[in-house]
Image: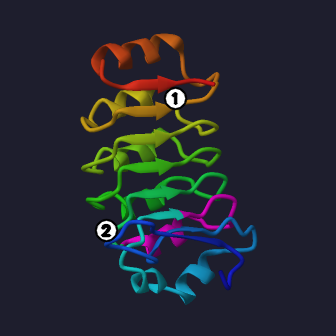
Amino acid sequence: EKLGGQVRRSDEVRNQGHVVSIQLDVPSLENDDLLQFNPWWLRFPALRDLDLSGTGVTDEGVANLRTGRFHAINLSDTQLDGSGLAHLADMPALHTLNLTNTGISDAALVHVQSMPNLTNLYLAGTNVTDKGLDRLQAVPTLRYVQLGTSNRITSQAIQELQEEMPELTISQF
């Protein structure tokens, strides 16, 4: 809250009042700010969701998120190019990752393959192509992917992914 973000507290009895979600959509927030407060989120044992959308965070800043506790991380509209995803690869609790409108490309999706429980992935407005969709087949836990409308991804590649992963919901808006 001191940084200008929003905090959501739990209504559950066992976590009553504990911070479970932090939204830091503060455009001036950058990597150094994460370093300064690293590991500030450890003070919140129930914290599950972190929203850094619209901030100046880059791949270097993502390295400061390695806690293994986050269930959902929103990095949409940040300065990521994908190399920082290696720092999130082994987070066992991570199930939702939003990379919308970032510089993520096919090469970065190799790190997504190492995310053991990822179920929801948002890739609209990225540089992912047909080749990147092929990499998603190696994520057996994936159940939802949002691609948006992209001239980099063909309908044939989407159809092939759907055939290989029939339980996957593919969203194009």
Q: Give the label on residue 92, or none.
A: none
Q: Give the label on residue 68, or none.
A: 2
Residue 101: x %, y % from top left: 65, 45
> Furthest-right residue in view?
28
The range drawn in magenta is: 51-66
Residue closest to the eye, 60 or 26: 26
Q: Is residue 75 above or below residue 126?
A: below
Residue at (37%, 71%) from the top-left corner?
66
Residue closest to the eye, 61 or 24: 24
Look at the image and tell me whether residue 89 can be seen. yes
Residue 144: x %, y % from top left: 41, 33
> Residue 53 colored magenta?
yes
User: Is 15 placed left or right of 38 in the picture?
Assistant: left
The three-letter amino acid code for the residue at tag 2 is: Gly
Q: Quadrant of residue 47?
A: bottom left
Residue at (37%, 17%) from the top-left corner?
162
User: Is 13 placed left or right of 130 in the picture?
Assistant: left
Q: Quadrant of residue 158?
A: top left
Look at the image and tell me whether residue 130 can be seen. no
Residue 45: x %, y % from top left: 36, 79
> Residue 23 colored magenta?
no
Q: Is residue 147 above or below residue 160?
A: below
Residue 14: x %, y % from top left: 31, 72
Residue closest to the eye, 78 or 98: 98
Q: Is residue 166 above or below residue 105?
A: above
The three-letter amino acid code for the residue at tag 1 is: Thr
- Inter-mark Cα distance, 1 to 2: 29 Å
Which quadrant does the C terminus fall into? top right
Name the residue that disc number 1 marks: 129
How was this image coloured?
rainbow
Residue at (48%, 58%) from the top-left corner?
73
Residue at (27%, 48%) from the top-left corner?
117
